[in-house]
């Protein structure tokens, strides 16, 4: 079991989706943060504090901008970078604008962030 990722906390962590699945978040390691029960669902957690939720989402978005350094990608390239199944990504990206099978970096990140940028 992974430890809580909050500095100074040594309790076992629970898997937290930074971009919630209900918002379109993927089941990929980059979208997980391990948090103990208090840091996962307590007052000072992404579920209890909009500020912390936005902080984690902003960190995730920054990671994505650092990962996607080119201006355009195919679903195959996106899948390889994320370590995710290409067919699942193709379903996710059906409504994302593309040009001849290439997706713009910002549109990719917006889709991975649940349809918005932070």
Image (cartoon, rainbow, N blue to C red):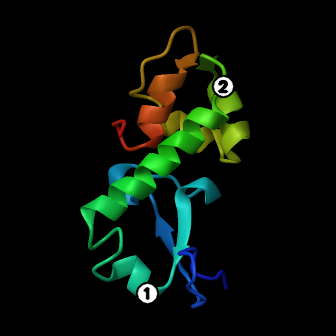
Query: Residue at 67% of width from left, 85% of height from top?
Result: 1
Residue 19 visible, this angle = no
The residue singled out by tag 1 in the image is: 37
- How crowded pointer 2 is (Cα within 10 Å; few <14, some 14-19, many 20+) is rated as few
Front-lying residue, 1 or 75 = 1
x and y, in percent, of residue 69 in the image: 66, 25
Q: Residue at x 55, y 63 (%)?
A: 32
Residue 66 visible in image: yes
Quarter of the image where one finds residue 13: bottom right
Horizontal and vertical percent position of residue 102: 58, 16
| Label drawn at residue 45 | none
User: Which residue in the structure is indicated by mark 2?
Assistant: 69
Instruction: Please say if 95 is above or below 114.
Output: above
Quadrant of the frame with the C terminus: top left
* Residue at figure coordinates x 42%, y 51% from the top left: 57
Disc on the earlier residue, 1 or 2: 1
Left or right: 64 in relation to 56: right
Seen from the viewer's position, the closer of residues 55 and 105 is 55
For the residues labelled 1 and 2, the Cα–Cα distance comes to 35 Å
* SS at mark 1 in the image: helix
Q: Position of residue 76 (x, y in %)?
A: 69, 30
Indicate whether 2 appears above or below 11: above
Outermost residue toward the bottom in this view? 11
Q: From the viewer's perspective, is 13 left or right of 112? A: right
Disc 2 is placed on an element classified as loop
């Amino acid at each position: 079991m992974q430890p809580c990722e909050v500095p100074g906390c040594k309790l076992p962590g629970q898997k937290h989706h930074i971009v919630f699945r209900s918002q379109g978040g993927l089941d990929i390691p980059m979208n997980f943060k391990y948090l103990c029960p208090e840091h996962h669902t307590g007052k000072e957690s992404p579920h209890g504090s909009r500020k912390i939720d936005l902080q984690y989402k902003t960190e995730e978005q920054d990671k994505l901008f650092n990962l996607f350094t080119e201006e355009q990608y195919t679903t195959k390239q996106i899948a390889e970078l994320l370590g995710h199944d290409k067919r699942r990504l193709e379903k996710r990206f059906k409504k994302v604008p593309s040009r001849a099978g290439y997706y713009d970096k910002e549109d990719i990140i917006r889709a991975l962030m649940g349809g918005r940028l932070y």
